[in-house]
Amino acid sequence: ASVLKHFPGYGGNADTHTGLAYDDRPLEEFRAADFLPFQAGIDAGAEMVLVSHNIVSAMDSRLPASMSPEVHRILREELGFTGVIVTDDLYMDGVRHFTGDEEAAVLAVQAGNDLLCCTDFQTQVPAVLAAVERGEITEERIDQSVLRILELKMALGLL
């Protein structure tokens, strides 16, 4: 499967492997430049999009893109992406300097990611399951992701 990354665009930002990265460019700059290769890839049939950990103030000044419902809304509604959305690794310092491992996983699912790239899966998977049990993440939300993942696997001949 092809994966487009790092949505919504990386620009000249700092490396989120080593710390937080802030992007203060206006939304129109993303629409005029950064979104173009993503739109072309989506139109060409890319099956997955990986979302960065940059905090993009024009979209969501509070949360990293990977944990932002607004960034995911833009990807789904404005760019028309219907495939699988995956986070960059939630163990990267750009996330770990922002929040804890458990909260990162829960926020990522709540934002709309279908797959979590998580080095610390022994902490993050149970955190997501506990959030479902507490009602912080609905089973319907999980089912939406499962359906997209299963459809991708079927399209790839894996099922």
Image (cartoon, rainbow, N blue to C red):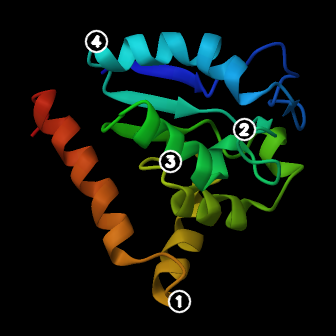
Judging by the rendered image, the residue that carries numbered circle 3 is 73
Quarter occupied by the C terminus: top left
Amino acid at circle 3? Arg
- Marks 4/3 in contact by CB < 8 Å: the verdict is no
- Marks 1/2 in contact by CB < 8 Å: the verdict is no
Amino acid at circle 2? His
Q: CA distance from mark 2 to mark 3?
A: 16 Å
Percent coordinates x, y for residue 6 in the rendering: 61, 24
Q: In what element is the residue under mark 3? A: helix
Judging by the rendered image, the residue that carries numbered circle 1 is 134
Amino acid at circle 1? Arg
Disc nearest the viewer among 2 and 3: 3
Judging by the rendered image, the residue that carries numbered circle 2 is 53
Amino acid at circle 4? Ala
Q: In what element is the residue under mark 2? A: loop
Q: Earlier in the sequence, mark 4 or mark 1?
A: 4
Along the viewing direction, whichever of 94 and 125 lies nearer the viewer: 94
Percent coordinates x, y for residue 151 in the rendering: 17, 42
Q: CA distance from mark 4 to mark 3?
A: 20 Å
Which numbered circle lies on residue 44? 4
Is disc 4 surrounded by few (<14), some (14 to 19) or many (20+) residues within 10 Å? few
